[in-house]
Amino acid sequence: MRSIGLPELLIILGIAVLLFGGRKIPEVAKGLGEGIRNFKNALKSEDKVEEKKQA
């Protein structure tokens, strides 16, 4: 399976602008970033809980 290249990325960004509009994109990106950050924090805290159970 090949990775996403520049042409594919530009098409995806173009579709995102058409769907959400230029003003909405920063809000969507911020929400996505916060979601990823929360997911990573949840994984880290779960690892700590498992380490305490093993000890």
Image (cartoon, rainbow, N blue to C red):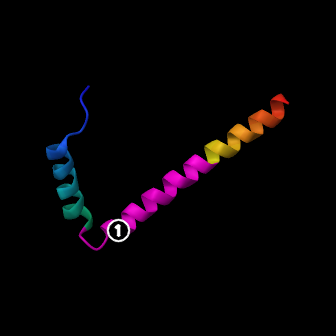
Residue at the extreme bottom of the image, as rendered: 23
What is the total number of numbered labels drawn onto the structure image? 1
Question: Taking 33 as reference, is 13 left or right?
Answer: left
Q: Can you give x and y, in whole percent of width and height, for residue 10 in the image? A: 17, 52
Residue sitting farthest toward the right: 55
As displayed, is residue 24 above or below residue 5? below
User: Can you tell which quarter of the image residue 20 is in?
Assistant: bottom left
Residue lying farthest to the left in this orientation: 7
Image coords of residue 36 (percent x, y): 49, 51
In which quadrant is the C terminus drawn?
A: top right
Q: Is residue 27 left or right of residue 34?
A: left
Residue ID at (57%, 47%): 40
Residue, disc 1: 26
Which quadrant holds residue 19? bottom left
Direction top: furthest residue? 1
Q: Residue, x 45% and y 62% (percent of image)? A: 31
> In the rendered structure, does residue 35 fall within the stretch colored magenta?
yes
Three-letter code, disc 1: Pro
**In x, y percent, where is residue 25?**
31, 66
Badge 1: few (under 14), some or many (20 or more) residues near its Cα, within 10 Å? few
Q: In which quarter of the image is residue 46?
A: top right
- Magenta region, mostly helix, strand or loop? helix
Asked whether 15 falls inside the magenta stretch, the response is: no
Q: What residue is drawn where x is 37% and y is 63%?
A: 28
What residue is drawn where x is 21% and y is 51%?
A: 12
- Magenta stretch, residue numbers: 21-41
- Relative to residue 49, is residue 12 depicted above or below? below
Q: Report helix, strand or loop for mark 1.
A: helix
* Relative vertical location of residue 47 with respect to residue 40 in this rendering, above or below: above
Q: Position of residue 34 (x, y in %)?
A: 50, 59
